[in-house]
Image (tube, grey):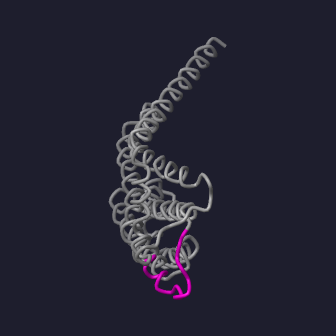
Amino acid sequence: MSDEPALNESFVSHLIELRDRLLRAIVVVAVLFLCLMPWSSNIYDFLASPLLATLPPGTHMIATGVVTPFFVPIKVTALVAFVLALPYVLYQAWAFVAPGLYAHERRFALPLLAGSVVLFVAGMAFCYFFVFRLAFRFIASFAPESVQLAPDIEQYLSFVMTMFLAFGVTFEVPIAVILLARAGIVSVTKLREARPYVIVGAFVVAAIVTPPDVVSQIMLAVPICLLYELGLLVARAIAKPDK
């Protein structure tokens, strides 16, 4: 019974620390958002540039809602602010959980956390700089001459967010492979034997989450397969020995 007040005090102190770290992360995101607000229209123009490059000269995107031209750039700016603040946000999460980890767990978890951030951002960048430009050009080439392309800015944002999330998550494949092997859940040998299923699964996932065009599907499926191989290479070096 004498330990109960100490446990309650410890629990409350952890809640206070969690609240403080969440507030710090929110403040940083909010400050970045406010700093970027004057350039919200330019940020959206940058996001839309891969699509605009495929439209006929003089063609513009449209906004079908009354407040859409105001809210859509703000949403994009908030997304950019969060991505820029992501290292600090994850640092706050790491600082909260790190004291409860063993030294060897910290040595393993910190590079994995940093790697997951780099891979997620790399997935978004790959999608923006390579997939969008090829996919939009491919899709526009099939548009009949009688059709005037004028995409809605809100629908475009929804499409971009879906694609960024899909590529960001799929670029985490090496992290998933490393975690499975390191935890001993699946041996590296079994992971190597699963290659054919991974290849088929990669194309199935790509067909589901990407637009119905061959270009974007291939450009998602192929990186998944390559990243799986990268994960195997790293897992082979750090995984527990096969039993």
Quarter of the image for residue 144 reads bottom right
**Which quarter of the figure is the N terminus placed in?**
top right
Q: Please state the horizontal and vertical placement of residue 173, each as a whole percent of the image.
A: 45, 63
Magenta segment includes 92: no
At a point 53% along the width and 25% down the height, the residue shown is 14
In the current view of this chain or complex, which residue is farthest to the top?
Answer: 2
Q: Please state the horizontal and vertical placement of residue 66, each as a whole percent of the image.
A: 62, 54
Q: Nearer the viewer, residue 107 or 149?
A: 149
State the count of labels.
0
Q: Nearer the viewer, residue 77 or 185?
A: 77
Q: Please state the horizontal and vertical placement of residue 143, each as a whole percent of the image.
A: 52, 85
Q: Please state the horizontal and vertical placement of residue 16, each as a whole percent of the image.
A: 54, 23
Horizontal side of residue 111 vs 182, given as left or right: left
Magenta segment includes 137: yes
In the current view of this chain or complex, which residue is farthest to the right?
Answer: 1
Vertical side of 37 occupied by 135: above or below: below
Horizontal side of residue 8 vs 221, given as left or right: right
Assign the magenta stretch its main secondary structure.
loop
The magenta region covers 135-151
Asked if residue 243 shows in the view, the reply is no
Horizontal side of residue 42 vs 68, given as left or right: left
At a point 62% along the width and 58% down the height, the residue shown is 65
Vertical side of 195 occupied by 30: above or below: above
